[in-house]
Amino acid sequence: MKNKTLLLYAFAYLAFLYVPVLVLPVFSFNDSQFIAFPLSGFTTRWYAGLLADSALQHALGNSLKVGVVTALLSTLLGLTAARAVTRYRLRGTGAALGFISLPLFIPDIVLGLSLLMLLGAVGLPLSLAGVVLGHLLVCVPFALIVLIARFEGFDKNLEEASADLGEDGWMTFWRVTFPLMLPGIAASLLLTFITSFDEFLVAYFLSGTEATLPIYIWGQLRFPGRLPMVLALGAIILGASVALVVLAEYVRNLGVKKPMVGA
Amino acid sequence: MNFLTITNVSKSFGGPPVVNDVSLDVARGEFFALLGASGCGKTTLLRMIAGFETPDSGAIRIDGEDMTMVPPHLRPTNMVFQSYAIFPHLNVFDNIAYGLRKLKLPKDALRAKVEAMLATVRLEGLGKRGADQLSGGQRQRVALARALMREPKILLLDEPLGALDKRLREAMQVELRAIQRKVGITFLLVTHDQEEALSLSDRVAVMHQGHILQVADPRSLYERPNCREVADFIGEINFFHATLREIAGASATVNAGLLGILTLPAANLAPGLKPGDHILLAIRPEHVRFADAGVVGEIAAATFLGARSHFHVKIAGRSEPVFVSGGAPPQGPVHLAFSPDRLIGLPTAG
């Protein structure tokens, strides 16, 4: 009896999570401008419309650029910080970790606004570079969390063994640390890319005239006629995001089944 | 003559010194053990020899060259880690060949070298195995082969057999000794297992709280410990309180309380003891025997161990039982006897 109630609760909860999300792809194939039931027929014209929209493609390009650069930089910064935190006895490690993670707890709107004022104060123009800076604040903590976990997962004797066998710090990194960190690095790249790609508020404040994809979508919502196209776009982004997250999780767990410590 | 020379080395990690003013000499080709309980500083000393830690003071020289500040990758030492530290992303062959990259050997020569080493550690045909497909004993051999491959001047072994079960450990002890004889490299072993240290090594240094208490060959260490800690740590031993009365020529007289006045060879006294000193008399369980006359006692506990048995014998006027090792005793009360030649006189403290 109790199990049945719990099962019902679980299904209700899953429905609550995913039914609204499913509305997006469903209406993106609906042959009507109006978002209302009953559905009026199947069409792919909204998707075709996307292909013809050059402003959209420009925004998509911007988002990809920002996302890739943010992912590479935040993973690199996260990698060096995670190594320092896990491999050395350093003073103030806890405080440093706290400060690095703080942007996770600051509302993005505050973050965006303060960066906007800062850029204005030092006289830098609004640009995609500014968006990358803002996204780094948000993404480095994610990279750090993923990478610290991976570093803690392997025996530091492995790096010592490499040094013992004649390799200096640089070669040890390439022959031991990097291959063992690879799944973590890949997961960090994917996670930070998605975070940057989906981010709206910071980009809204800092992008100036160069819209990223979320900003473009936000702009399109003023035109009711374009709503189905936005749904089609949303459906594509949704699919791609899910695919990336699944891929990130899969990659992150690669090699975990192998013993990561010597004993 | 001295191959590894450690001079007045100290190291602390922000607290009391972990290694405290240690000096040690090891000869070329020697199998040397650092023996001590966990936390005695033996692993820290080993890591300083490998270069993973830097001494706060003192010097480490290997084959005449000062190594104190040389980073690990430039030292002529190689280490077998306690966790073995087998690279999980490489197979057995690549693990063993790891340290040979700089030699830039042609492929065939490299293969021949690694195959020969695989044969030395009896892992023929396992080169393609992944690190996760090895048993504990095989991992130990891979770690050993990988370290030996670079022909180090000194091979450092950090509790190398600690992770193996008893039977495998005993087999590996024999093999380790054989490999050492074959390659002729100086082995420096760290262990908390006194049996392992005694059975493997030419000489043993006993460490306690950051100090080296005694350096000697296994037999001397067992028969002539120089202090209570060493006597206690190496095998079983009985202690009796006594007072040193006088030393006359080659013999010494002690008042051993309930054991009476005894005369023993002066050579059995630890150096530095003077008449009037309060001392500890120590005797091994196998040197105490059941006799027709002597100290009267009662057997409190007996453990049958095959060829010999262990007995705890309660005697009047002493709270601790006397530990006796030998054959089966007569029924009822027993008499304990021993030859005073077997008594060792030790200082009560330090």
Image (cartoon, coloured by chain):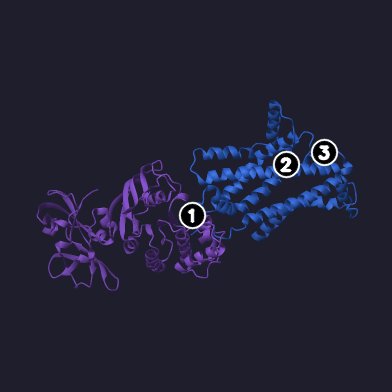
Chain colours: A blue, B purple
- Density class for disc 3 (Cα within 10 Å; few <14, some 14-19, many ≥20) is few
Q: Residue B299: x and y, percent?
A: 22, 67
As helix, strand or loop, the secondary structure at mark 3 comes to: helix
State the image quarter where residue B33 is shown.
bottom left
Who comes first in sequence, dot 2 or dot 3? Answer: 2
Tell me the quarter of the image containing the N terminus of chain B. Answer: bottom left
Three-letter amino acid code at the position of disc 1 = Leu
According to the picture, the residue beneath numbered tag 3 turns out to be A219
State the image quarter where residue A96 is shown.
top right
As helix, strand or loop, the secondary structure at mark 2 comes to: helix
Q: Does the image show residue B92?
A: no
Q: Residue B226: x and y, percent?
A: 23, 54
According to the picture, the residue beneath numbered tag 2 turns out to be A66
State the image quarter where residue A53 is shown.
top right
Disc 2 versus disc 1: nearer the observer? 1
- The residue drawn where x is 71% and y is 45% is A68
Q: Residue B88: x and y, percent?
A: 55, 59
